[in-house]
Amino acid sequence: MTESGSPATDVAARVAYVFSGYGALWEGMGVALMHEDATFRAAIHEVSGQFDNHMDWSVEEQLKSARTGDYRNLTVGGPAIFAIQYGLILALAERGIAPSVTVGVSFGEYAAATASGVLTLPEACRLVAASALALKAANGIGGTATAAISEDRAHDIAAASHGDIQIAVVMSEGGVLLAGTDSALDDLGTELAREGVYYHILEEFPYPYHSPLMAGVCTLFQQQMDHVRTAPATVPMISTVTGDYIDGPDLNVEYWTRHFVTTTLLRQAAHRAARTETIFLEVGPRPHLQTPLRTHRRPDGERILVLPTLTRHKPGTAALDEAVDRIRAHGE
């Protein structure tokens, strides 16, 4: 972003920044880019300093340590992925790239709101820290699974489960993430296996995020956050809670409380973004959303270019610079 808050872009292409969620976490994320890119390194240091006001551990040191198991704890993984995404926003801006719209998936919504100018960095870090600390209440209450089923089928499963299974994320027309109790998810796996339907319990993500089972988290969150300071968006933001455009005043405490217990509408938000954008840039430590994003088309039927910012095979400037080059070429 520029000092005035307007997009710092010098390319013709319209780029939707799609900020990935917890599925993008991996050991060693951000380390190579910290070594190779001064802007990214300074941003991580800046974010870590802000988090020091709210947490008793260092985000910067956690990223450098690259301990995989720590990211299974949402109180660690959440601030870590936000730091990576904030660093990428600044590293991309340094290269002349900025979003024309933002979308955030799950925990990625905090970075989306920051990139849109709705949240200042200090306020975003305060909100992320409160959210991450509140998530301690989710320990042991359930989990998450991915299933190759339609949204309609998922609704039928949720209705038949009497609250034990909910739709966590609508990824695409033929794929969802489900949140539920461990026993209900196990039973569903047995049922879908008989049908030959792809289904996988995400053992690395042992929380029923984005479901009513997270109600206890909401209580703890509201004890920590009695208000959220926002500003009008300088870059449009599409909410994955509502599936439509949203502005600063609506991203209040009530919104972020709903965020814990409400289905994430990636498919709907991406469909909305595809009406105006020509590129989806997944902003995160590794590609996680490329397949569902590629299912979308512009109104004229043209394919949308879908790019990652970092990958595990190219975790430093190579992947980032490649994405920038392709964005520039696409806008010519």
Image (cartoon, grey):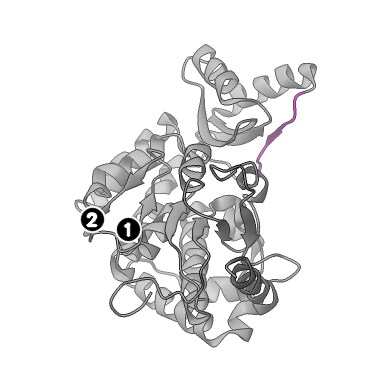
Q: Are marks 1 and 2 in contact (CB under 8 Å)?
A: yes
The boundaries of the magenta stretch are: 197-204
Picture quarter with the C terminus: bottom right
Main secondary structure along the magenta-highlighted residues: loop
Q: Nearer the viewer, residue 236 or 252?
A: 236
Q: Amino acid at mark 2?
A: Val
- The image position of residue 104, as x and y in percent, is 46, 52
* C-alpha gap between disc 1 and disc 2: 8 Å
- Pointer 1: what residue? 127
Q: Is residue 220 visible?
A: no
Which of the 4 image quarters holds residue 298? top right
Which of the 4 image quarters holds residue 220? top left
Say whether residue 28 is left or right of residue 158.
right
- Pointer 2: what residue? 228
Residue 200 is inside the magenta segment = yes
Q: Is residue 98 above or below residue 294?
A: below
Q: Amino acid at mark 1?
A: Leu
Residue drawn at x 68%, y 71% is 319
- Chain-order first, disc 1 or disc 2: 1
Question: Element under label 1?
Answer: helix
Q: Is residue 108 above or below residue 35?
A: above
Residue drawn at x 37%, y 53% is 237
